Amino acid sequence: MSIDKSKPVLVTGATGYVAGWLVQRLLDEGITVHAAVRNPNKEEKVAHLKAAAAKSSGDIKFFKSDLLEEGSYEEAMQGCEVVFHTASPFVTDVKDAQRDLIDPAEKGTANVLESAKKIASVRRVVVTSSCAAIYTDAIDTVNAPNGRIDESIWNETASLTYQPYSYSKTLAEKKAWEIAETQNNWDLVTINPSFVMGPPLNPKATTSESFNILKQLGDGTLKAGVPKMGVGVVDVRDVAEAHFQAGYNDNAKGRYITSGHNTDFLKMALQLQDRYGADYPLPKKALPKWLLMIVGPMANKLFTRQFIKNNVNIEWNADNSKIQNELGIKFRPLKDSMVDGFQALVDANIFATK
Ligand code: NAP
């Protein structure tokens, strides 16, 4: 099955951090991108996409769509052979997890994929899932068979009340596979990134949690230290390439863990030290687990004792061989992702008030 690059593609949530680089990658390939966004008239959300289109051989058309409005992606999907479904809220501090995370993730996925069943041109659907659909806490990766997660594993520990973002991604991906089974027009491929780092294309308007962490490393919030929490990290540009390959590579099949590095928050922060340590209040050391157990729950409602116990000073391990072998993805060094990401925030004067 070869996908025709002269046909348009749909990118849902085109305003997002991850989607921005995917849209740019598609435009640079000369492809026409149907960018589905909540508000095409919000210039600060779409200006970087228009700028990318102007510099490329591709073309961009905007459509107004919302995950919770049934059928609202159908117009944007007309004529597309590939649908990249990236839209889903990536926030951790929510008032109502069902309303703010689960519904847009799960119902939104059903909305987009049910529409894909009606549009005859669609041949492949790529859903941006997450390693969060595979694990909740670093300890889950250690407890996995062979001491590392792979594509055969599903998250069984997240819930509406414990790490609901991970729960939302698990329910959404399960829903996607369920719907894919009910039809024969297109095949489903999922990209399951770990924590995404690297430069945002629109630093001033980015809502992604990835960006919040990068910001907190430089604005002094974490100057006393960071929890040495095991985490996987992948560069946003590598995630875009992974999506591109998942859309256009004939061999793409199933789920793909998309993670460059088994690392932790302290190692991530230390990548910035030699270049920015003199000018920014970057964390240099790990906060002790006993201290976090006492102050963590007071500082942040998500930093419960259970979370600290299962993540702090625990390694994070994933097997990232499938995407390298099948889709030829190579991962950038961790330092490049951290430095390029931080520099993008410096250039955008995000730390102007330090
Ligand atoms: P982001 O910048 O906040 O992007 C989220 C996107 O979803 C935005 O375009 C947002 O639109 C859209 N969206 C949210 N609610 C919507 C709704 N009700 N209707 C329509 N669109 C809606 O976050 P991101 O990090 O790029 O995340 C993109 C995808 O990658 C998500 O599926 C996320 O779960 C996945 N992911 C991210 C990471 C990571 O570390 N960043 C890791 C693994 C997987 P607006 O601009 O209008 O708000």
Image (cartoon, grey):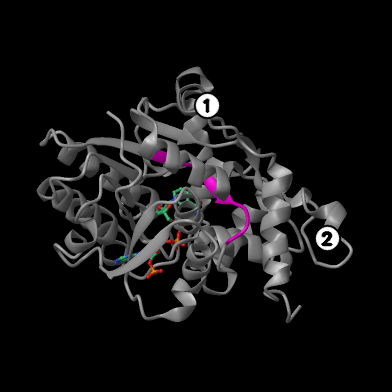
Q: Residue at x 51, y 35 (%)?
A: 139
Left-right relation of 49 to 86: right
Asked if the residues shown at circle 2 and circle 1 are in contact, with their CB atoms under 8 angstroms apart, the answer is no
Magenta span includes 68: no
- Residue type at mark 2 is Tyr
Foreground pick, 291 / 162? 162
Q: Is mark 1 within 8 Å of ligand 1?
A: no
Q: Where is residue 195 shown, x and y percent of the image?
A: 54, 47
Q: Where is residue 298 shown, x and y percent of the image?
A: 56, 66
Kindly identify which residue carries mark 1: 324
Q: Residues within 10 Å of mark 2 (few under 14, many from 20)?
A: some
Magenta part of the chain: 191-200
- The image's mark for residue 251 is none
Q: Residue at x 22, y 37 (%)?
A: 177
Task: Report which quarter residue 340 is drawn in.
Answer: bottom right
Q: Residues within 10 Å of mark 1 (few under 14, many from 20)?
A: some
Q: Is residue 245 above or below residue 24?
A: above
Kindly identify which residue carries mark 2: 276
Q: Residue at x 27, y 28 (%)?
A: 1
Q: Is residue 343 above or below residue 29?
A: below
Tell me the SS state at disc 2: helix
Left-right relation of 212 to 251: right
Q: Where is residue 228 shown, x and y percent of the image?
A: 67, 45
- Can the viewer see residue 131? no
Pick the quarter of the image with the C terminus.
bottom right
- Residue type at mark 1 is Gln
